[in-house]
Amino acid sequence: MKMHLYPDAITKDVMHRRVLYLAVTGAIFLALSCMLERPAHAYVDPGSSLLLFQSASAFVTGALFYFRRRIKALFSKPRVSHTQQGTQR
């Protein structure tokens, strides 16, 4: 019996629509955020940029750690098992 990645109720078409919906919602949110910007009369502490840098570096490090096996598979040769070696002769 073949195991599917997605349950029967969630097909690739449904997932594609969800991703598209998320992208459009994000684009609308970003556009509205830029259009409704108001001037801020405040002092920005020099440490604020360091906090942004630390957050971004933590995000990148976390993503690399989460996807480490997939990234490693991109740069390594696939291993040939003993059963495959016998059939290639």
Image (cartoon, helix red, strand yellow):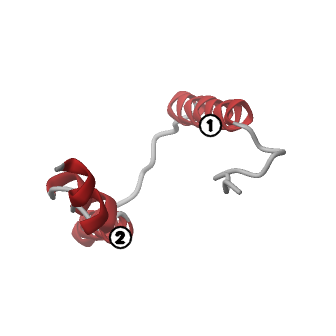
Residue 84 location in percent, x, y? 28, 57
Q: Is 82 situated left or right of 27 in this image?
A: left
Return the residue nearer the eye: 61 or 79.
79
Q: Is residue 72 visible?
A: yes
Q: Is residue 44 visible?
A: no
* Rendered residue at 67%/52% (across/down): 4
Residue 17 location in percent, x, y? 70, 30
Return the residue nearer the eye: 43 or 77.
77
Q: Which mark is residue 62?
A: 2
Q: Is 41 situated left or right of 32 in this image?
A: left
Residue that badge 1 annotates:
19
User: What amino acid is labelled 2 in the image?
Assistant: Gly
User: Where on the picture, by quarter, is residue 16?
Assistant: top right
Q: Give the mark, 1 or 2, whose residue is nearer the N terminus.
A: 1
Return the residue nearer the eye: 10 or 17.
10
Q: Between marks 1 and 2, how big is the CA–CA gap?
A: 22 Å
Residue 49 location in percent, x, y? 26, 63
User: Where on the picture, by quarter, is residue 59?
Assistant: bottom left
